Image (tube, rainbow, N blue to C red):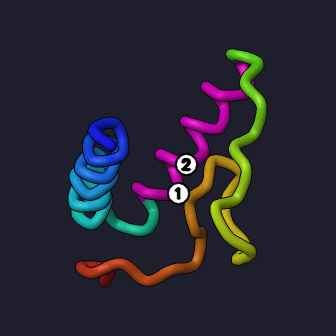
Amino acid sequence: MAGTDVTARRRAAIAEILERLTPTQRLALIEALAAFNEAGGEPLAPDRDDTESHPLGWAMDVPVAGDA
């Protein structure tokens, strides 16, 4: 359970940071992380549900607070 709590807190903290980025900045981050993932030979992360998401598990077209 403790690991689940830590993961939930980390996800929330990351989400707060991502909300501060513009859509263009978020896309650049996704592209950079995907390149890093590919260079490291890491397998793609599985989707957490049936909704279409980025291979790293991030939804691509979900509006985020602060988007202008």
Span highlighted in magenta in the image: 25-39
The kind of residue tagged 2 is Ile
Q: Which residue is mark 2?
A: 30
Quadrant containing the N terminus is: top left
Q: Position of residue 30 (x, y in %)?
A: 55, 48
Whole-Å distance between the Cαs marked 1 and 2? 5 Å
Taken as a whole, is the magenta stretch helix, strand or loop?
helix
Q: Which residue is mark 1?
A: 27
The kind of residue tagged 1 is Leu
Q: Position of residue 37 (x, y in %)?
A: 65, 28
In this rendered view, identify the residue nearer to me: 64 or 11: 11
Above or below, 39 relative to 45:
above
Residue at horizontal 26 percent and vertical 58 percent from the top: 12
In this rendered view, identify the residue nearer to me: 44 or 7: 7
13 vs 1, left or right, is left
> What label does residue 68 carry, if any?
none
Q: Position of residue 23 (x, y in %)?
A: 43, 68
| Snapshot quadrant of residue 54 | bottom right
Quadrant containing the C terminus is: bottom left
In this rendered view, identify the residue nearer to me: 51 or 54: 51
State the SS at label 2: helix
In this rendered view, identify the residue nearer to me: 30 or 46: 46
* Residue 26 sits inside the magenta stretch: yes
Residue at horizontal 70 percent and vertical 59 percent from the top: 47
